[in-house]
Image (cartoon, grey):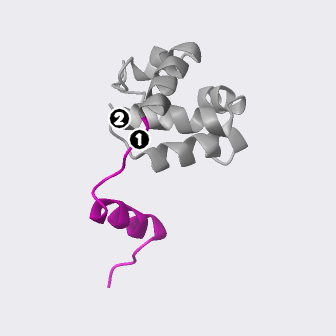
Amino acid sequence: MRHITRNTVLALGVLAAGGCSLPDDQVERGAALATEKGCIACHGAKGVSLAPTFPNLAGQWPQYLRVQLLKYRSGERQNAVMNGQAAELTREEIAALAAFYAAQ
């Protein structure tokens, strides 16, 4: 029998509900933050990375992106560049960045 994780259950719930809706103002704020914070330097203007060493963020689930940024911010997930980038982000900025990249 397969092990079903909490994230799988949440994802199935979102799919059953017809996907996720992201507020336009949050997506717009995220676009501005991606430029302001320098995210586009590695992840591209639309979340498609500029080199294979950087992950594509376009179309990722917003919850996944939020969780990963929070883990970088706390140091739970280690990356020399991302830990520094995420360290100063507020929860609201993280949510806006996640909304922007998810909407691409």
Residue 67 drawn above or below residue 36 = below
Q: Are marks 1 and 2 in contact (CB under 8 Å)?
A: yes
Task: Identify the mark nearer the N-term, 1 or 2.
Answer: 1
**Residue 41 drawn at (x, y percent):** 47, 14
* Magenta-colored span: 1-23
**Residue 21 drawn at (x, y percent):** 37, 46
Instruction: Determine if residue 78 is in view.
Output: no
Residue holding disc 1? 22
Total numbered circles: 2
> Would residue 62 be found to the left or right of residue 86 on screen?
left
Pointer 1: residues within 10 angstroms few (<14), some, or many (20+)?
A: some
Seen at 55% across and 16% down, the residue is 38
Between 59 and 93, the one lying in front of the other is 93
**Residue 82 drawn at (x, y percent):** 60, 30
Let me know if residue 100 is in the magenta part.
no
Seen at 50% across and 27% down, the residue is 30
Seen at 35% across and 35% down, the residue is 103
Residue holding disc 2? 103
Seen at 33% across and 79% down, the residue is 2
Q: Nearer the viewer, mark 1 or mark 2?
A: 1
**Residue 18 drawn at (x, y percent):** 27, 57
